[in-house]
Amino acid sequence: MTVTLLRADGAREHLSDDVLDELDAALRGTVVLGGTDPGAPEPCPEWNAMYGDPAALTARCTGTADVVEAVRFARERGLLVGVRAGGHSVAGLSSVPDGLLIDLSGMRGVMVDPQRRLARVQGGALLGDVDRETQAFGLATPLGRVSETGVAGLTLGGGYGHLNAKYGLSCDNLVEAQVVCADGSVRTASETDDADLFWAIRGGGGNFGVVTSFTFRLHPVGPIVAFAGVMYPLEDLGTVERSWREYAAAAPDEVTTFVVTMTFPAAPGMPEIIHDRPVAIVAAVHCGPDPDEGMRVLQPLRELGTPLFDLSQPMPYAVVQASFDPFFPRGALRAYWKSQYLDELSDDAIDTLARRAADRPGPITLVNTFRLGGAVHAVDPEATAFAERTSPWMVSFDTMWSDPEQDEAAIAWGRSAWEEMTKYGNGRVFLNFTGRQDEPLQAGTDTAFGRNLRRLGRIKADLDPDNFFQMNNNIIPTPG
Ligand SMILES: Cc1cc2nc3c(=O)[nH]c(=O)nc-3n(C[C@H](O)[C@H](O)[C@H](O)COP(=O)(O)OP(=O)(O)OC[C@H]3O[C@@H](n4cnc5c(N)ncnc54)[C@H](O)[C@@H]3O)c2cc1C
């Protein structure tokens, strides 16, 4: 029996049983033939149901040595390769139905060194894995807002979350990474070793190799933090967001805040007044040491209008980190997200957001506005590959639906809302919130990386001249 895989050059490669046995013998983990082995579902399926097809061949890795073997195997045969950690790429970048998937979901270990305030995290860990271990010591590193997201994709693409204003992006807190490069070599990258690689992986995505471990700097956070979650009627978004804008612009760095609009589900335990009700949720975390003081600082967010319901209270940080999880079940939703940065959140921009939020194509589509600044902006745009260090606002249209028949209409809505917003944007986008769907893999890399794109192209040419790692926001190898 043979399995046929797509090569990176578009040709087909037929792999015999003997060849597959060779890979199987080389791994401590296992080899799974997708599609032919219904009894072996992928352990970490793609989050976006549009990209749910299993890979033709999956190497379930248990450690760095397995990754080296999988990279060498694929390289010798010119196979198209995907790498998956948390599978939360909205654009389906870790989905390779015709290729070889390097699956890291068996690599979720987290080791905390509380004395040195460092956490070493394996390449397939999810955010919740890290928060769980670090919170055992009252520590945290900035990560995202949904606990099943992969640490790897999030960090390699920047990493926005509840601690940004005080402690920066996830990638800003990286102090070391172990990387399996395209030639199969294993490098340890930090400010002092392989500094170009270290620079590139802080924002440049999965272009430069498979990161098998990340070492993060930790900060004292929680265990209780102040949380604001205030639901206003969606009809009031225009006035609420104007007042939120004033608050957010003057808030101390302990506060990270955003506004999300959705139709709240009829969730058990929640008051009927918000069941199936379009709402604008003003959310914020104050990460300072005194939650009562934090609640006082957040109080104005509870008075931006007349709330329908108010969830604000001091909360365990780990609970806050998982509080948005129910809205983002894995493998159940189809999704097309698009974002852009704004230099100014003008009244006209707010009115446009309010209008588009009112005509969302379905209840689970979100229209979000994020306040950015503080420690994120304290980093020089050229100090890491992540170039966006000046925009105070980001908006994202997270179009989500479940019926495949709605694909075309939902994506069209997401595109048109995003395009309408471009007259207020500064032309830059956040690559981790991008919808692919017939868009080229390089879409947006020029604006996202700005001046850093040239250096990224050179580092890519050094480390991966054949573009072996291309299932990502792809940087074309550019020698020179
Ligand atoms: C529900 C949801 C919530 C989100 N919330 C946030 C948020 O709060 N903040 C934020 O900044 N972003 C957020 N994102 C975006 C998210 O950060 C990106 O989609 C990210 O790529 C997901 O990482 P992953 O490891 O789960 O993805 P995967 O789909 O596994 O991988 C994404 C990309 O990274 C590459 N990759 C994965 N692992 C490795 C590795 N170890 N080494 C090298 N390359 C690798 C893949 O090949 C692919 O190109 C969210 C996305 C979703 C779907």
Image (tube, rainbow, N blue to C red):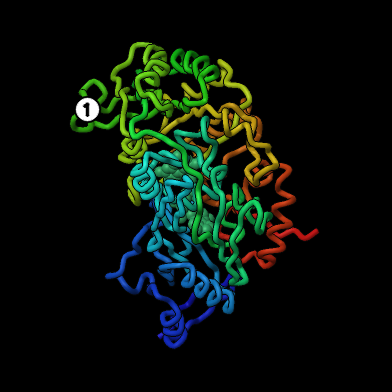
User: 256 left or right of 422?
Assistant: left
Element marked by disc 1 = loop
From what the image shows, is residue 17 above or below residue 45? below
What residue sits right under mark 1 in the picture? 270
The answer to whether one can see residue 440 in this image is no
User: 199 left or right of 40?
Assistant: right
Assess disc 1: are there few (<14), some (14-19) or many (≥20) residues with their C-alpha within 10 Å of its C-alpha.
few
Residue visible at 19% across and 32% down?
268
The x and y percentages for residue 91 are: 50, 50
Judging depth in this view, the residue of 269 and 49 nearest the camera is 269
From what the image shows, is residue 284 above or below residue 473? above
Residue visible at 55% across and 45% down?
171
The x and y percentages for residue 63 are: 44, 67
Residue visible at 43% across and 67% down?
55
From what the image shows, is residue 314 above or below residue 100? above
From what the image shows, is residue 149 above or below residue 423? below
Asked where in the image residue 357 lies, by quadrant, the reply is top left
The answer to whether one can see residue 28 in this image is yes
The x and y percentages for residue 233 are: 35, 18
Q: Residue furthest front?
A: 115
Judging depth in this view, the residue of 97 and 208 nearest the camera is 208
Judging depth in this view, the residue of 108 and 472 nearest the camera is 108
Total labels drawn: 1
Residue type highlighted by circle 1: Met
The x and y percentages for residue 120 are: 46, 54
Asked where in the image residue 422 lies, by quadrant, the reply is top right
